[in-house]
Amino acid sequence: MLTRYGTDNIIVMLVISLVLLLAGYFVTNKWVSIPFYSAGILLAVFTLWFFRDPDRNIPDIAKADHSIILAPADGKIVNVLEEEEKYFLKGPSKRVSIFLSPVDVHVNRSPVTGTVEYYEYFPGDYLVAYHPKSSELNEHTRIGVETNCGKVFFKQIVGILARRLVCELKVGDSVEAGRRFGMMKFGSRMDIAISPDSEIYVKEGDRVVAGETIIAKLKCDIE
């Protein structure tokens, strides 16, 4: 299945692929036609691969227990650290950062169940996504969700290749853990900040799957 978040890109890229294949067909010299055929096929394959949107098996525990934090993006854990979060938690936090390479699924899913209480879009630069300053300087969205067990803050952050973010959330929306909410295109990063007394279940170097991997658990007094 292909994501609806990339429909415009998919159409343009497949049209370019078709043009390249037709150019290869109409070129009489086979040695000249090979590069056109190759480029057309490679672009079509990359398009279908990059914009794939596989179904995910949301853990039953995440549906029942609102303290569970799921990975909001596919990729590799590049940071697990403590820092001040100034936008939504407004205090000490634990931050988990996920780096997405161009071959990862780029559709994003809500890490928790709750209500969107904060949303802001920030236009910015295009540093490589794993750069320590990319979280603040690159183009990104800031999303804050209030759950039954506390606040969760996360960011979609573009990288050096990405040039567009898609986020369909707005303040007041209800979200469910594992539900699709947007996409980051062509290599990017996702940051998740939670309260410092939360349990973290991942470490740097781990691979995670959006909507399936449990990355943390909030401390929750609700029985």
Image (cartoon, rainbow, N blue to C red):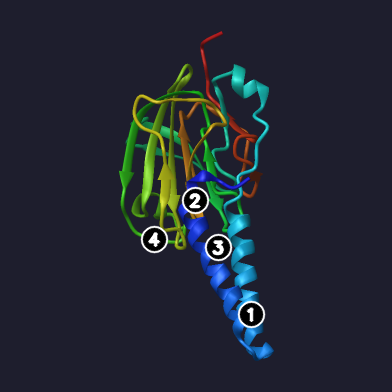
User: Badge 1 is on which residue?
Assistant: 25
Q: Look at the image and tell me whether residue 12 can be seen.
A: yes
User: Crowding near pointer 2: few (<14 within 10 Å), some, many (20+)?
Assistant: few
> Percent position (x, y) of residue 115?
41, 23
Q: Which residue is mark 2?
A: 7
Query: In terms of sequence position, does the residue under pointer 2 or pointer 4 come before the other?
Result: 2
Q: Residue at x 42, y 49 (%)?
A: 165
- Looking at the rendered structure, the kind of residue marked 1 is Tyr
Of badges 4 and 3, nearer the viewer stands 3
Q: Quadrant of the C terminus?
A: top right
The tag earlier along the polypeptide, 3 or 1, is 3
Element carrying mark 1: helix
Q: What kind of element bears circle 4?
A: loop
Q: Which residue is mark 3?
A: 14
Q: Judge from the rendering whether residue 68 lies leftward or rightward of residue 120; answer left or right.
A: right
- The amino acid type, in three-letter code, at marker 2 is Thr
Q: Estimate how packed mark 1 is, as few (under 14), some (14 to 19) or many (20 or more) residues with alpha carbons within 10 Å.
A: some
Callout 4, which amino acid? Tyr
Residue position for label 4: 126
Q: Residue at x 46, y 61 (%)?
A: 128
Q: Residue at x 61, y 74 (%)?
A: 21
Query: Callout 4: 10 Å neighbours few (<14), some, many (20+)?
Result: some
- Whether residue 130 is visible here, answered yes or no, is no
